[in-house]
Image (cartoon, rainbow, N blue to C red):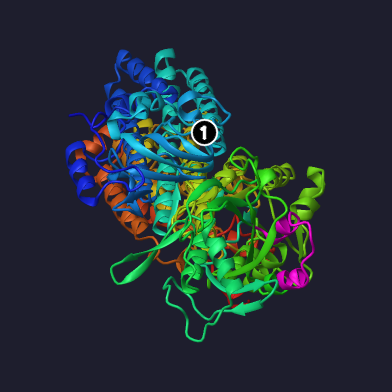
Amino acid sequence: MSSSTRQQSTAPSAGLTSAEAATRLRLDGPNALPAPRGPRPWLELLLQLTHLFAAMLWVAAGLAVLAGMPQLAAAIVVVVIVNGVFAFLQEYRADRAASRLRELVPAAAQVRRDGITQSVDVSEVVVGDVVLLSAGERVCADLELAEAHSLAVDESLLSGESLPIRPRGGSRLWCGTFVVEGEAEGVVTDTGARTRLAGIASLTQTARPGRSPLKAELDRVVRAVAVIAAGVGVSLSAVAILLGLSVADAFLFGLGVTVALVPEGLLPTVTLSLARGAQRMADRRVLVRRLEAVETLGATTFICTDKTGTLTLNQMSAVSTWTPTGGRTDFDAAGYDPTVPPGTSPGEDARTLAWAAASCVRGRIIRRGDGWTPQGDRMEVAIDVLARRLQAPPAEGHAVLRRLPYTADRRRSSIVLTRPDGRGADVLVLGPPEVLSARTGIPYPGLHDAVEELTSSGLRVIAAARRAAPPGWQEASADQLEQDLELLGLVALEDPPRSDVAEALERCHQAGIGVAMVTGDHPATALAVARQVGLAGPSTIAVTSGELPSTDAELARLMTRPEGVVIARVSPEDKLRIARSLRGVGHIVAMTGDGVNDGPALRAADVGVAMGASGSDVAREAADIVLLDDHFSSIVAGIELGRATFTNIRRFLTYHLTDNVAELAPFALWALTAGHVPLAIGVLQVLALDIGTDMLPALALGVEPPGPRVMVGPVRSRRLVTSTVLGRAFGLLGPTEAVLSLGTFAMVLSAGGWHWGATPPPELLAQASGSAFVAIALGQLANALACRSSTRPVWTTRFRGNRLLGWALLVDLGLCLGFVAVPALADLLGGSVPSALGLAGAGATALGVVAADAVAKRVRRSGGGGGGGDVDASSWPARRALRRR
């Protein structure tokens, strides 16, 4: 019997029994969509072997074969295959890692089984389950609605319609859609592969992500280097023809130079660096949904953070009540145990207040084992606990006739209940004090003072009110029902700040990152919490939604005022405006959110950060980053890793460009001297350097960990190619390596009897060429050590933080010796074992790179250079500066 036609054996209101649910789960299988079929591996590999640069190399290999140079053709093919396979493996690993990380996000559904509401994993939902839905949740299966209260559902995933629909009881809801407003109960009709979503899921798998700013920047760099390489190749071909080479030989010579100088290994290295950064963030409970968001988060200059659950623990307890007749009553009890605290003697008015407030919410505590477990929104759970402690359980002896769930425009929720005697009904309303007091129509002495006293202590305050249901309440609007209210009182809830927030905020201050609290809470509560965690000072102001400036420019000035600002009672539209205004003045904005209405602001920000533990499915779907633990400090940790990742990209870009200078110098010298100085290294040796001795150190630089100075000072530039990069590659390290390696070549030739313009014997040329090859290789190994820092000398660094670099240097040293010592490789490449003088010159090249790097760093430090976004993370001046703080 199919799951869609099986009859329910339990009334929808009670739900299935646990035994029935277990049986149906065994029969139908888990409620999960078929695993999406990712890109076919062979097709992805083919794409990596046939993109623009690869196509150019394939053409070059074909021309080399036609010209009778199979060695060059084979070397070019090796370049294409090695880089293509490596890029494929990195992309494949990144996709697999992203899939594993996505599984860390909790997915639960509220169902009614055995007559009680409980939370189960979405995969355990079965046909016949009664599912309870509220705003912000994703529909976990195909449902038939039993009840709907002010329900609005976003079906754009299936229909493409941007406006939400408002289904009623008896309508169908589809798996994968989002509840954007209201509450509902529905009975599951189909799960897993039998849902409507599963039938069209394949259509969404073809979507490809857009090109990020980082990828665009990388493309510009690679294209520029490729154009330069092609220009150099054409120029050297022309020079070769003028020196007497045949057109065919000159063409192949220039083509080989071009191929050797194209940085094919750059893009795979960047992919690995971003993937490593994403994995490190996952280790700190920060889920990256897009790899490029790693870099964007690192560039953040302004954070708009919520209060509840991010700056606070989201572990609410009701600690006080206030009623118009009984005044204030405090409770010394925390946690979820509903036992009445000793010495508690609340009046009947406090019990009525707690009963009314709890009747309006759906969050509850349930008995599980020897303890009590919260189910639902933590604020609602705290109200339920209060009602049980005061022996006023919600809706006892009353039938729920109608619900009007909380909406962002009304800012209140209501419920219509029958009276115990069956004569008429009451309307109970829950919402902010200022909203409900405005709908009572009469002043309540002491209300304003009570609100100010509670909120100034950092407590979250909510009010409850009631009225007799008016005639025709069944069809009355929310506005008609929620007027002429009688205020029952206030409930004050405590949500302690997180202990690590103050330190994280101080790190933001050191990094030049602005932070503002943007919350829906009362302004006094928000300001009090902001002061507790160090976000606000004596001059910080709290501004409500209605007090925000009308223009974006003025709003941006308000948000960035030096004394700080707290934005309270904020609406979704306000958060969207705030994100746009800050971006309009050049800020890179990270916006946190957890509710269904936060989706637009999360998308509008440069980095949308959703709460993974307490946030809604809508918020998580809209975000680039998901905090699995909801900690503000996790955002700061992600920024630190993002900065380190971008710095690493600059590190190995400097490393690659330096190598190109050293590899190009022998060809330039040969051309400028009209062939009077022999070619120090050939095209195949250049390819051996690129593939054999450069790749592993570059990869190791891509995973360099952050150090203590990475969060000191603002990021100065988001450009990969900066004056610092160009200066170090083309003005310092590259020329130093080139001059010393060519000097080694010339010394070996001169020691063997060569003089200007003469043709050296083949044995002598091979020995000198091998010496130049080893000199460049050792210079690059020293360059890798120098690129770890832009402020710290090589000899003061340690491999403890990056053991991969130590292994990479050892492996590359072995490869370098193999290229000149193994006869078959030496004959193929054109070099041989260096002489003692050549080895000394090669060692001097490495030492010269280290010395030049140290002198330049010393000069830069004495000149006051540095900055958090463009300097080393582990320099000794940085540690001294941090100790002084």
User: What is the x, y in percent for residue 336?
Assistant: 43, 70
Residue with the mark numbered 1? 154
Q: Is residue 429 left or right of residue 378?
A: right
From this view, report whether residue 857 is shown above or below residue 139. below
Q: Nearer the viewer, residue 359 or 573?
A: 359
- Taking the magenta stretch, the answer to whether it contains residue 446 is yes
Check residue 447 for magenta coloring: yes
Furthest toward the bottom, the residue is 343
Q: Can residue 593 be seen here?
A: no
Residue 200 appears at what percent x and percent y? 37, 24
Name the foreground residue: 192 vs 433: 433
Q: Residue at x 51, y 86 (%)?
A: 343
Residue ID at (61%, 46%): 407
Q: Is residue 520 visible?
A: yes
Q: Nearer the viewer, residue 383 or 866?
A: 383
Report crowding for label 1: few under 14, some 14 to 19, many 20 or more residues within 10 A (C-alpha): many
Amino acid at pointer 1 = Asp
Secondary element at image label 1: strand
Residue 59 in the image: x percent, y percent?
38, 17
Q: Specify the quadrant that holds the N terminus.
A: top left
Name the quadrant containing residue 773.
top left
Tell me the magenta residue range: 431-452
Q: Is residue 444 above or below residue 595?
A: below
Q: Is residue 704 above or below residue 190?
A: below
Which residue is painted at 49% across and 52% down in the image?
A: 615
Left/right placement of residue 137 relative to residue 683 reads right
- Percent position (x, y) of residue 106? 38, 51
User: Residue at the location (33% across, 14% down)?
Assistant: 67
Quadrant holding the C terminus: bottom right
